Image (tube, rainbow, N blue to C red):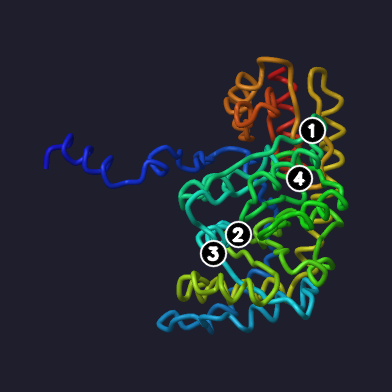
Amino acid sequence: MDDAVNTNRVKHWVRPEVQALKAYHVPDASGYVKLDAMENPYSWPAPVVDEWLAALRAVSLNRYPDPGAAELKAQLRATFAIPGGSEILLGNGSDELIQMILMAVAGPERVVLAPEPTFSMYKIISNSVGLRYHGVPLKADFSLDVPATLAAIVELQPAVVFIAYPSNPTGNLFAREDIRAIIEAAPGIVVVDEAYTPFCDGSFFADLARYPQLLILRTVSKLGLAGLRLGFLVGAADWLHELDKIRLPYNINVLTQASARFALSRYPVLLDQTQRIRAEREKLAADLAALAGVAPFPSQANFILFRVAAGRAGELFQRLKEQQVLIKSVHGAHPALHDCLRVTVGTPEENQAFITALRAAL
């Protein structure tokens, strides 16, 4: 078939909203000090790895996994003290759960709302399923603009409001009373995305009984289990019952179920790692603040957003890459992120390599 004919066929059948999207880009990090993806930098101690591999020997790869992942859900409920009146829905990463939510409510002219800047997948998936996405700019200090958000809710009547807590890519915690005001005003679902809650002391689990329209999104990725691709959604049974109808069968494979159960049974190991990351975050923030021309923002996550001198973000990002240090440039992603870069908190050695490279680049 002629290439031009096939190109025209693609343009004819693929929805314009999809053609307008840009795929989520993941750069090749081979050989770099990798501080671009908010991963836990620590591996397990060798004895724990041996115990995990022994546990996997009992897994039957020739059988389909438990479609409801009952044992894993029970482990999640116990580990994270999930309220007894709430149900749990599992996803292949939190991205799949975001997709389930948006597919369930998709319809002509329906709106998804989120404060911006925020996690890019809210907008990408909204557009991919035919929903209209609307971002409400944060204030200059990255706090919620509550009057503007409430006005947008009244005007647009969004089907879903997403709020990242702590926020990504800014790292700050929004005021709880501001989030509650949004929940109370929203006509549809409010999803509080707590992906980075291991690195702070805040959660909205206690508010689930008060707000039946509230859903809480979690992931085990930031705990050091990013390779498992396991997210979980917590909320009222009537919402999750409908969302479960969209979930693909056997979406959580046997290796993920077995590995997650094992890892959560060794939860103190994960907690120790998160505490080390918290301590390193404070040291890294201080080291950044000591550099001339660098202004880090306060963070309650496992990354730090920082602003550099006007017009230098792209140059510094490239100079770091030349020194085999990979961070994330968010310059250009949103007007509020002008001249900003974001670095994941790594091991002490990785953080020092980054600071040394940045100092040389400046």
Residue 290 location, x and y as percent?
87, 25
Q: Residue at x 71, y 32 (%)?
A: 354
Residue at mark 1 to residue at mark 2: CA–CA distance: 27 Å
Residue 60 at least partly seen: yes
Which residue is the site of mark 4?
A: 150
Query: Which numbered dot is residue 139?
Result: 1
The answer to which of marks 1 and 2 sits earlier in the sequence is: 2
Residue 240, quarter of picture: bottom right
Query: Which numbered dot is residue 92?
Result: 3
Left/right placement of residue 324 relative to residue 296 reads left
Q: Amino acid at mark 3?
A: Asn
Q: Amino acid at mark 1?
A: Lys
Q: Amino acid at mark 2?
A: Ser
Left/right placement of residue 76 relative to residue 81 reads left
Residue 357, quarter of picture: top right
Residue at mark 3 to residue at mark 1: CA–CA distance: 33 Å
- Label 3 environment density (alpha carbons within 10 Å; few <14, some 14–19, many ≥20): some
Residue at mark 2 to residue at mark 4: CA–CA distance: 26 Å
Which residue is the site of mark 2?
A: 94
Residue at mark 2 to residue at mark 3: CA–CA distance: 7 Å
The answer to which of marks 3 and 1 sits earlier in the sequence is: 3
Q: What element does badge 2 sit on?
A: helix
Depth-wise, is mark 4 or mark 1 nearer the camera? 4
The answer to which of marks 2 and 4 sits earlier in the sequence is: 2
Tag 2 and tag 3, C-beta contact below 8 Å: no
Residue 267 location, x and y as percent?
76, 70
